[in-house]
Image: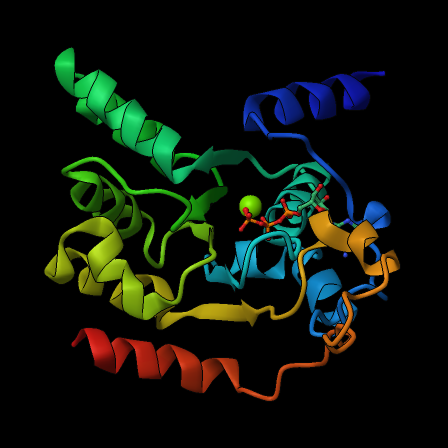
Amino acid sequence: MRQERVLKRRTHAADFRHLKTLEEFDWQFNLTIQRKQIYELATGAFIRKSTDVFFVGPPGVGKTHLAQAIGYEAIKMNFHVLYRSIFDLVRDFLKDEAFSQQERTVRKYLKPDLVIIDDMGLKSLPRHSAEYLLEVIMRRYENRATIMTSNRPLEDWGKLLGDVPSASAILDRFLHHAQTIAITGRSYRLKDQALVAPPEGKTKAKPNEPSTAGSASKSSEARSLLA
Ligand SMILES: Nc1ncnc2c1ncn2[C@@H]1O[C@H](COP(=O)(O)OP(=O)(O)OP(=O)(O)O)[C@@H](O)[C@H]1O
Ligand SMILES: [Mg+2]
């Protein structure tokens, strides 16, 4: 069927990494994640409005899983999606800089209806990373939707990018119309370790509890820190 072929082609073009779907997500594991909020994002309304989504939280809580699953739902609605880790994004720019084809790279990042920039904070970034990310965010701002994920708080972005002014310029635009999904709790990667009895004298791990911190206030707090 033609529609199936299109879906397959667009999924391939999105370049996902170990794509998992919303159906594969265990909503009971982490109660700080609101299923309703994620399904609302999966309707693609934020893409139509060209707004942004920021997933922030510790390792293994499902940021990459959910970002890609939302991307996949968007593809099913005929949107063009591109998935990239921040390292791949920087690599794309560095590679094309060597061939003076930066405009081509910029266009590649401008065209998709949704770009997912994953793994902010996972490891240190090469020089000029902030400029490349700023270029992408600046061009997409109020024009196309972007999802970013980070396992480090926004206050750390200046240091992560090695460029505080660019980090503030990136966050100022990115957060302007962004919905922040702040996830707390344990890593799903360590899920099975919960079955092991805690060592003598240590208290049992608590189940994940819903976060009480408002995401909006978190963003403005981080922004003022960067200002
Ligand atoms: N609630 C969940 N239900 C099912 N699978 C989950 C859940 N949370 C995480 N996973 C799975 O656990 C693994 C780690 O999740 P993921 O890669 O999304 O974490 P992350 O938040 O992006 O972490 P990191 O900051 O290290 O990149 C993946 O295989 C993912 O599919
Ligand atoms: Mg991840």
Location of residue 165 in the rendering, given as x and y in whole percent from the top left corner = 11, 61
Residue 154 lies left or right of residue 203; in this view the side is left
* Location of residue 184 with respect to 81 vertically, above or below: below
Q: Residue at x 20, y 46 (%)?
A: 130
Task: Please state which of residues 29 and 69 is positioned toward the viewer in this rendering.
Answer: 29
Residue 77 lies left or right of residue 24; in this view the side is left
Location of the N terminus by quadrant is top right
Location of the C terminus by quadrant is bottom left
Q: Residue at x 86, y 66 (%)?
A: 28
Residue 170 seen anywhere in this rendered image of the structure: no
Location of residue 159 in the rendering, given as x and y in whole percent from the top left corner = 21, 57
Task: Specify the quadrant of the image occupied by residue 77.
Answer: top right
Residue 162 seen anywhere in this rendered image of the structure: yes
Q: Residue at x 82, y 63 (%)?
A: 27
Task: Specify the quadrant of the image occupied by residue 75.
Answer: top right
* Location of residue 215 with respect to 175 vertically, above or below: below
